Amino acid sequence: MPRLENGGWSCSCAARGRHRAQPGGTAAGLAAKVGGMLSSSGSSPSLTLVGTGARSPSTATSTTSTLNWSQHLVQRSVVLFVVGAFMALVLNLLQIQRNVTLFPDEVMSTLFSSAWWVPPCCGTAAAVVGLLYPCIDSHLGEPHKFKREWASVMRCIAVFVGINHASAKLDFANNVQLSLTLAALSLGLWWTFDRSRSGLGLGITIAFVATLITQFLVYNGVYQYTSPDFLYIRSWLPCIFFSGGVTVGNIGRQLAMGIPEKPHND
């Protein structure tokens, strides 16, 4: 009997111990579940923050590249404008001294005995042409790589000045011979320093458009040419515009070397 009593007491104690242990185990399980939920909820914001941090550097890089590209574009435009205005001032002065180009008397007292609007207009045209050449090259997928150095560009400028000087100083039997000679020199300038289809096409387009504008200005009495043989102008003028377009295009291409690429919005 004592053994049975001891056994019953031990069994009841064990049962009570098990009942006491179950609430504790249940509490521990709940605590583990709550901890897991907290850890999972805590990890999601961290992932979100990491994702946000991964996007912000790319946005900053895109903004920086946009600013660099815009700044370089403005710098190229200013350089091309200054070059175009200076060349127009010098070459137009040569034409005036040789009595090839005549302006009204009221503008002869201005800077270098030339019209005030000539350098700004030519500078603006040079900036547009100089930016257009590398843009057309990139769109056609044919980057210009022929003689890409400043020494070649300077020689091209010297040849262009020589062609313009020849148009004012060389005396031929008639303007047709002079025009053919300057046309051959202009094509030689393109072949020597360019040799691209885009350069040839843009040169011809520039010569055509500039000739039409010149015809319009002369027709309205803004200025005039002596001995005109092509409607109101000289027949060799398109050759000057063609060689000038090729020259300014080479300057613009050289300035465009090493520029940052224009950012694309994906």
Image (cartoon, rainbow, N blue to C red):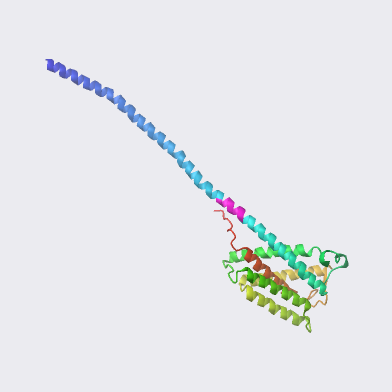
Q: How many marks?
A: 0
* Residue 221 at x, y percent in the picture: 84, 68
The residue under the point 77% across, 67% down is 89
Rendering quarter of residue 25: top left
Rendering quarter of residue 214: bottom right
Along the viewing direction, whichever of 164 and 56 lies nearer the viewer: 164
Task: Check residue 66 for magenta coloring.
Answer: yes
* 44 up-or-down from 202: above or below: above
In this orientation, does residue 235 appear? no
In this orientation, does residue 12 appear? yes
Q: Residue furthest top?
A: 1
Q: Residue furthest bottom?
A: 173
Principal SS element in the magenta part?
helix
Along the viewing direction, whichever of 105 and 238 lies nearer the viewer: 105
Task: Check residue 262 for magenta coloring.
Answer: no
The residue under the point 82% across, 73% down is 97
* 232 up-or-down from 31: above or below: below
Residue range (magenta): 61-68
The residue under the point 36% across, 29% down is 31
* 25 up-or-down from 232: above or below: above
User: Which quadrant, please, contains the N terminus?
Assistant: top left
Give left or right: position of 237 versus 136: right
Q: Residue furthest right?
A: 105
Q: Residue furthest front?
A: 151
* Residue 34 at x, y percent in the picture: 38, 31
Give left or right: position of 51 versus 141: left
* Residue 193 at x, y percent in the picture: 63, 73
The residue under the point 82% across, 71% down is 96
* Residue 79 at x, y percent in the picture: 69, 61
